[in-house]
Amino acid sequence: MLEQNKTISIPGEEALEVLGEIEFILISLHKIGSYYSDKSKEAYEKATTDFIDQQMVTARLAKIRRIITERFDSSLDDDDMDDIERYLDGMEFWKPIS
């Protein structure tokens, strides 16, 4: 890891923005789960999917990622990767079950 990436700083206003987005997503998903705990799985899944789509959760998460990643020095190392790429390299993502 580059020395300048060992400590990153995020202005308080942006940190609050990140925390607000995380709180909105986390608490909303918790409330959906609690509300649908004694209801059908299908209703829970639909409500969760609707929330993700209608509240643009992926865009909110992308905004959080942007705010955090902007603070890193993205200089490439000998392996032609920056610190973030190197850390995330090999991460397994969702894929359809075959």
Image (tube, rainbow, N blue to C red):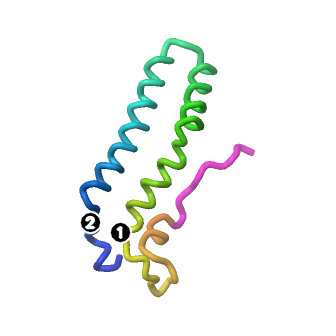
Q: Which residue is mark 1?
A: 71
Kind of element beneath mark 1? loop
Instruction: Give the mark nearest the N terminus, 2 or 1.
Output: 2
Q: Quadrant of the N terminus?
A: bottom left
Kindly identify the residue that appears in the image at 70 percent across and 45 percent down.
96
Most foreground residue, 55 or 79: 55
Kindly identify the residue that appears in the image at 48 percent across and 47 percent down.
60
Rendered location of residue 18, percent (x, y): 36, 50
Mark 2: amino acid: Ser
Assess whether mark 1 and mark 2 are in contact (beta carbons under 8 angstroms): yes
* Residue 95 part of the magenta segment: yes
Mark 1: amino acid: Arg
Residue furthest to the right in view is 98
Say left or right for 95 vs 39.
right
Is the residue marked by circle 1 packed among few (<14), some (14-19), or many (20+) residues within 10 Å? some
Q: Quadrant of the C terminus?
A: top right
28 to 94, vertically: above or below: above
Kind of element beneath mark 2? loop
Rendered location of residue 4, percent (x, y): 29, 78
Say left or right for 73 vs 36.
left
Residue 9, labelled with which disc?
Answer: 2
Kindly identify the residue that appears in the image at 26 percent across and 66 percent down.
9
Most foreground residue, 17 or 39: 17
Say left or right for 39 vs 29.
right
Rendered location of residue 15, percent (x, y): 30, 54
31 to 11, vertically: above or below: above
Q: In the rendered image, which quarter is residue 92 located in? A: bottom right
| Label 2 to label 1: alpha-carbon separation | 7 Å
Kindly identify the residue that appears in the image at 44 percent across and 84 percent down.
77
Magenta range is 89-98
85 to 44, vertically: above or below: below
Residue 87, labelled with which disc?
Answer: none
